[in-house]
Amino acid sequence: VMGGEALQCYACMELKENGEVDKDNTVACDDASKRNCTEDENACATAKGSFKMTDGKESVKMEATIHNCATKAAKDVEDAICKDAKEYAEDLPGFKDFKCSVKFCETDLCNA
């Protein structure tokens, strides 16, 4: 980035359970969640993931959209983010239908 200006990205997330927003764990993408990235972080990222699990007898669909600063290196960064998310979730009861994707962008606040 020219002139030593740090890239600015949103650091926020939305969590949903069966389509309903989980207000306790959601962080709005607004002025309060803007963040100056570090020198090593050259992109803003938006990661989306979803999976199903069984909560007792019910099947629950969990969805998450997470925004933050990131280092855009190569495809392996996306794979690592999704692999970590899957490893976290796959021990949950009835885990299935895991989906994950990451998008990068390189202008200020482009990841809203």
Image (tube, rainbow, N blue to C red):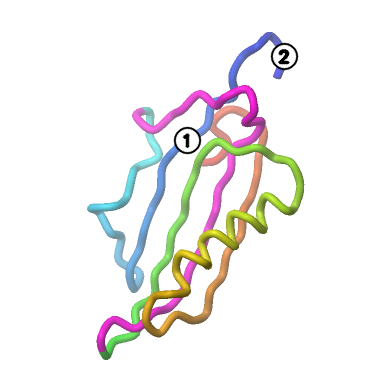
- Image x and y of residue 111, in percent: 55, 40
- Residue 31 shown left or right of residue 78 in the figure: left
- Residue 28 shown left or right of residue 11 in the figure: left
**Does the magenta segment cover residue 70?**
no
Name the magenta segment's main secondary structure.
strand
**Residue pointed to by mark 1:** 10
**Residue pointed to by mark 2:** 2
Q: Which image quadrant is residue 63 in?
A: bottom left
Name the residue: 47% across, 74% down. Answer: 90
Secondary element at image label 1: strand
Secondary element at image label 2: helix
- Image x and y of residue 18, in percent: 34, 73
The disc at residue 58 is: none
Q: Are marks 2 and 1 in contact (CB under 8 Å)?
A: no
- Image x and y of residue 48, in percent: 53, 58
- How many neighbours does mark 2 have within 10 angstroms: few (below 14), some (14-19), or many (20 or more)? few
Name the residue: 58% across, 27% down. Answer: 108
Query: Hey, what amino acid is under mark 2?
Result: Met
Front-most of 84 and 16? Answer: 84
- How many neighbours does mark 1 have within 10 angstroms: few (below 14), some (14-19), or many (20 or more)? many
Name the residue: 23% across, 53% down. Answer: 24
The answer to whether residue 77 is above or below residue 20 is above
Query: Hey, what amino acid is under mark 1?
Result: Tyr
- Image x and y of residue 23, in percent: 25, 54
The answer to whether residue 23 is above or below residue 68 is below
Q: What is the span of residues highlighted in magenta in the rendered image?
A: 32-56
